[in-house]
Amino acid sequence: MAGPFLAHPITIGQLLSHNDRKRVVVPRFQCGFSWKQKHIEAFWQDLKGFIEEREQPEAQKRYFLGPVVTLTASDDETYLLDGQQRLATTVILVHCMRHLARTYGTDGEDFAGVIYNEFILNEDLGRTLELGELDDQFFKSTIQEATPKSPKATLTSHRNIESARKKLMSSLEQRPASESPQRALAYLKSIRLALKNDIYLVNIPVDAERDAYRIFETLNDRGLKLSVPDLLLNYLMRTAATEEARKEIRKLWNEMVRNLGKRDISHFLRHMWVSTHGDLKANDLFTTLKQHIEEKETASITFIQECAEECEAYVGLFDPKQLELSPEAERKLDDLVNKLEVRPVLPLLLSLTKHLLPDSGFTKTDFEKAIEKLLVFHIRYSVIAGQDAGGYEDVLYKLARSTRKLLENRGPRQESALSHVKSALSAASPNLEVLREAVKQMYLDADEAKYLLTRLATHLQTRSKETQVSETNVEHIFPQSPSEEWSEDQIKSLTPYLWHVGNLTLFGKRLNTKVANREYAAFKREYYMANSELEMVRSLASSYTTWDEKAVLARAEGLVKYILEVWDFDNSSRA
């Protein structure tokens, strides 16, 4: 190892532009670009603050941005083993500066060419920074090309790159509108000089990749808080027995990232752990995973293979067609996972879908019914009763582990997994008295309202025949933008109830725009009675002559019966 005493300061300009004429390359073990808005904002504020302060006579003329770890790979390449986020963000910033400078006339065009050749594409070196294999082509197309393109972001890291570009462009453009092009260009030049000469990194050179893995973890232990995926992949690569194993780990990891698409891999890792071992206790996720691997003496390659298998099942939960369920079950799973975005159910669903095998004793019919039970539980516990989110997760996480254990150790006299799920959810659900009272104070967000009212309207519509309510949209009886027909007293008293369940209904999309904001009496006369084919709307019109606070609460109370009929553990097919 090169040794800790050889660490030395280096400017961003030196690393990107004058690094012994070498390209900076992110090696294969690195995760993708992961900085979020908060990291980009912190980077920008630090840079902006330094540029403003250094104009003062006694100001510090150097600013340290943090450590990087590098490895000389060849005569023309330097591997960037740690520091990808900061250098990639710098290149994105220069891309934004170049775009803005080109709007400032001939001088701006010249400046744009200078910084492009310094920080992005050097005539001798080619691209000054190359990202890992999952991000490099996207980064090249959107940031580094002379004429950037806009390819579709297919991964979370791609979306992070897009988000960083938008954030930095917006930050650069926040200059006074009256500012002259010359003054605006002078500000960009001051940023360029700071990046080239005054923003320093602490470069820690190493002689081998394995040394970098240890430094990576040490940096995290010393307060540089790294993401769980970064740490886990780094750890698996460090502990792999052979170079061949490291290649396979990287391959399987890339496949997981591609399969997950824009979904965060750290969420998958957490849900996988919860599904197999229960909720996390005192330790963070990375420490927990590391301890588990070491205690079980699991080979790195074995662990990543298990992760890849779990990931394939996990991804199927977001795309119900992959599971080949009935159309109605596909709709319900889509409602639960994608439309309502009920993330705490994912570990339990993962436990169940992992055992959808011909000889497991757990059938697709069982799985479909389990989805219904979860919808019933979610609506009762979270949407209607609004009970503690921590308790909600505790119920589902414990059930995920116990259900997987039951399916893995099935015996002829054990209860079925479906019965186990139903009894646990039913026992944890609020009782009928609590639910009846809670409906009177139930406020919904837009997604909850769409799902709940559609299911209620379908139930009311199908009491005598099978009919699915579709092509409808949620509307407020007292509207979000009331017309002048509504009195000031009505507006004052009804505004707090805008998203109350009693104030919400479904209208046909085609008719809604004609009468959207009218006062209730006119609305009832011109639309409710004359045009609507929905039983939900007809019953509303026949029950209330005026619309006030009492009507909202009375209607909510009138819906209680139907809500409890639809979200019923013993007859969950209506959910």
Image (cartoon, grey):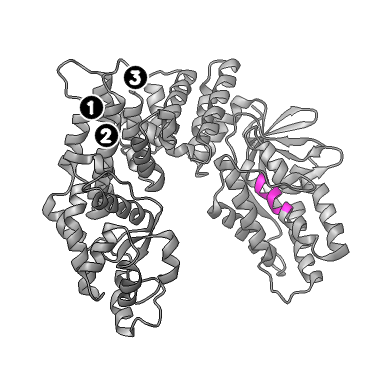
Three-letter residue code for mark 1: Ala
In the rendering, at what x and y percent does residue 466 appear? 27, 43
**Residue 4 sits above or below residue 477 on the image:** above
Disc 2 marks which residue? 370
Q: Nearer the viewer, residue 413 or 512?
A: 512
Quarter the N terminus occupies: top right
Disc 1 marks which residue? 417
Kindly identify the residue that appears in the image at 26 percent across and 19 percent down: 361
In the rendering, at what x and y percent does residue 130 appear? 71, 37
- Asked whether residue 136 appears in the rendered view, the answer is yes
Pointer 3 local density, CA inside 10 Å: few below 14, some 14–19, many at least 20:
few
Label 2: element kind: helix
Q: Which of 124 and 64 is in front in this view?
A: 124
Quarter the C terminus occupies: top left
Kindly identify the residue that appears in the image at 77 percent across and 52 percent down: 196
In magenta, the rendered stretch is: 87-95
Left/right placement of residue 132 relative to residue 284 reads: right
- Dot 1 or dot 2: first in sequence order is 2
Residue reaching furthest bottom? 488
**Residue 331 falls inside the magenta stretch:** no
In the rendering, at what x and y percent does residue 55 appear? 72, 68
Three-letter residue code for mark 2: Ala
Left/right placement of residue 286 relative to residue 365 reads: right
Residue reaching furthest left? 433
Left/right placement of residue 109 relative to residue 332 reads: right
In the rendering, at what x and y percent does residue 345 appear? 32, 39
Disc 3 marks which residue? 357
Q: Overall secondary structure of the magenta stretch? A: helix
Contact between labelled residues 2 and 1, with CB atoms less than 8 Å apart:
yes
